[in-house]
Image: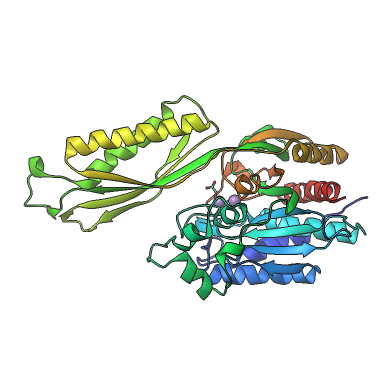
Amino acid sequence: MKFAINRDRLVSEIQALGQISEAEPPVVTRVVFTDADLRARAWVIGKCKEAGLNVRIDAVGNTFACWTGSDASAPAVGTGSHIDAIPNAGKYDGVVGVLGGLEAIRAMKAAGFQPKRSIELLIFTSEEPTRFGVGCLGSRMLSGALTAEAAAKLGDPNGDLLDEVRRKAGFEGSLNNVKLAAGHYHAFVELHIEQGPILERERISLGIVERIAAPASANIFLEGSGGHAGGVLMPDRKDALCAASELILAVERAARSTGAVDTVATVGICDVFPGAVNSIPSKVRFSLDVRDTDLARRDGVMNEIALAGKGIAAKRSVSVRTEILNVDAPAECAPEVIRALAESCGTHELGCLPMVSRAYHDSLFVSRIAPTGMLFIPCFQGYSHRPDEYAAPEDIEKGALVLAETLAKLAS
Ligand code: GLV
Ligand code: MN
Ligand code: MN
């Protein structure tokens, strides 16, 4: 069966969704359960309904748009990604997988294909950690990696609890019902931009992910002693920001010291209290994000950072406390899904590259409950999590086409 992707429609929908933002477009900021996130969800759900899909939404807002197969009781084939976006982001991260998945379904329908298994398009809630601290919130809960109890207690920076915020946003029902029944999916495939430079550099339009790196994140709190910037003499200081600065450089050193390109560590947030020009910082909180394809090496880096914290705390007479937010294992993609993706590339005479995903994705958690694979397309200069993120229409089209081919194969 021959599938045709409507490239213009798909690209114009990606552009249109990019206009729904808390920030002035082309900057996309769509933090979970904000007005922009809710408007974006409603817009995508409208498109799913127009395409004849049945929409179900769970208690945390994970959205399932289902094309019922001829054997509705057989485990379904899933696809999809996320539409939430970190502050100052672009239009493509996650969105290509959601709207590309929808376009793939429309292409299959237009070609007269009838799936045996149902095909479900998912919009996962809060793949990004911006508001509640942990990434892949929706898929973590679907997979059972995050319990309803633990999720309900997650708080946002205002101290509002997930359980209250999701209800206010209109998502009712028990969080206990979010976890999917074992065997719900026969297979799952996520289309995503690479968020790195390799495909563009190699001039190859498609990457088949074999492994997803293991992410860990933490908040690190330092407390020293504040006071007057003029009055407190240097030997008497317990400056929390100076201590944090040393520790942040130790984070960088720890990641570099493995000598592996796959080890990365980032401090992306640093809050200073009280935050006045003429006041010695007494408290600092900074975020820590460490990833590696090798779990032991990632944990080694975390330990090294903890050790550095102890040393700096003793030397500078400040306290250092670490709150671990998540320490996740890496994921292996399923051989049968990798094979289906590779065959689909072959059918269309499209070259593909085996890849590692250094970014995390909802697939990291879906892989715990279903055979899972990911398809990457290039993005300009590897840029992502920034407003000039860009994927070329021809690559988006190829990605959606191979996705359609693969979903059809898996759903037959
Ligand atoms: C996902 O956005 C990630 O940070 O890898
Ligand atoms: Mn992202
Ligand atoms: Mn993403």
Q: Please say if 276 is above or below 371.
A: below
Q: x, y percentage for residue 154? A: 44, 60
Name the side, left or right, on which 85 lies relative to 187.
left
Q: Residue at x 79, y 55 (%)?
A: 104
The answer to whether residue 6 shows anywhere in this view is no
Q: Please say if 136 is above or below 247.
A: below
Name the side, left or right, on which 122 lies relative to 223.
right
Q: Residue at x 57, y 52 (%)?
A: 140
Q: Please say if 262 is above or below 56.
A: above
Q: x, y percentage for residue 15? A: 66, 62
Give residue 123's quadrant in the image.
bottom right
Q: x, y percentage for residue 23? A: 50, 65
Q: x, y percentage for residue 116? A: 88, 55
Q: Residue at x 57, y 56 (%)?
A: 141
Q: Residue at x 72, y 43 (%)?
A: 371
Give residue 322's quadrant in the image.
top left
**Colour scheme employed for the rendering of this structure:** rainbow
Number of marks drawn? 0
Give residue 357's quadrant in the image.
top right
Q: Please say if 71 is above or below 332.
A: below
The answer to whether residue 110 shows anywhere in this view is yes
